[in-house]
Image (spheres, rainbow, N blue to C red):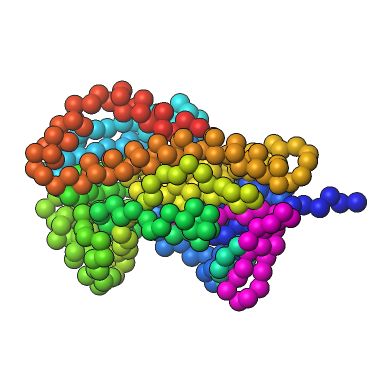
Amino acid sequence: MAVRKERAIIVGGGIGGLAAAVALDRAGFDVAVLEQAGELREIGAAIGVQTNAVRALRHLGLAEQVIEQGVPIEFYEYHSWRGRRLVRWSQGDIGRALGEPTVVVHRAQLQQVLARAAPGVRLGQKATGFEQDAGGVTVGLADGSEVRGSMLVGADGLRSLVRAELVGDGEPRYSGWAAYRAVTEFSTAEFPVGHARQTLGAGCSFGMWHLPGGRVYWVATIKEPEGLDVPPARRKAHVLARFGSAHAPIRKLIEATPDDTVLRNAVSDRVPVDSWSSGRVVLLGDAAHPTTPVTGQGGGQAIIDAHVLGDELARTGGGPFAERAAAAFAAYQRRRMPVTTEITNEAWFIARMHHFSNRLAVLGRDLSLWGTPARTWNRRMETRLAF
């Protein structure tokens, strides 16, 4: 007689939710992913999948598929507003030392790789709340129906419904800046393939990364008041007005971008908390530890969460499932919480540094970056990316 599988309900079908579906399926669960959108459509432009996340994907059997969709980063650089190189480290060497590369992929392609491997995805299923009891968890849906399972994973992002009921810590913390993002066809000897570059100004920064097919992904960040509205038709001009005087090829890259294709989001995170679980319910990814994206670790940490959560649940032995889940959730938090708390706090500090607006503070920042030896940057990155 077949052994009944425990059902894991996952709220949210983004990168973290889909990765969790793959991980929990491999751990022997019957998986149901509840995604409120009617179709899986990722509009986040691109994402850096760094060495630690690629290693987690390797455990999920998906690393090669993602690597094939991306452009490896060999060198990462910081530049001043006028183009002076302040910092350069070899991301490629670090990846080779740790066993996996860092690649930049379009988010839609990463999502497609995950979605093809993820079982039980249900679209158009908006969760409205949940209740847990001694026997399981019941998730209520907007259409009045319910889904019953043995456990619930909240992977529903920055403004997570599951987190609101589990933690109840209110609104996210606004960073003080907004990100403008786009992808465009662009090629120049001033920005060789394999390089990633971050330019720091006063109250702003500009990053650029290569994608397959002769495309470049760029992100412009600008210190702006919360609540500012910049309509899609004005965003390119808004960014060009701020970055038009920066070093080459930034102006040309912005000008090459099609009008009305620039995305904008006000960037927020949350102050780290000391618990992501209660009973049969656990949080993952941005629902657990949203971070500002300056370290490029947000999506990658969600993938790592998924692998670790699945790994800990697979390790549990016999006995009542509630006890096994509690033990697995505690072990998951012990492995993940120190790492994600450090990343969130570090990213908040780095983001403030990126957006210094006082001239003396900007000068001091640039001199400090320029004066830090390359070997120090290599050690920092190796420590951050080891997993």
Q: How many marks?
A: 0
Q: Residue at x 17, y 36 (%)?
A: 365
Say whether residue 42 is left or right of residue 115.
left
**Residue 378 screen position, x and y as percent:** 34, 27
Q: Position of residue 371 (x, y in %)?
A: 19, 26
* Magenta highlight range: 131-158
Question: Relative to 260, is 52 on the left or the right?
Answer: right
Q: Is residue 155 visible?
A: no
Q: Of 187 and 253, which appears nearest the observer?
A: 253
Is 144 magenta? The answer is: yes
- In the rendered image, residue 224, in percent from the top left (x then y), is placed at 21, 58
* Nearer to us in this view, 141 or 73: 141
Q: Nearer the viewer, residue 261 or 231?
A: 231
**Horizontal side, residue 116 vs residue 29: left or right:** left
Say which quarter of the image contains residue 49: top left
What x and y, as percent, mark residue 286?
Answer: 46, 51
Q: Is residue 31 above or below residue 367?
A: below
- Indicate whether residue 78 is drawn in magenta: no
- The residue at the far right in this view is 1
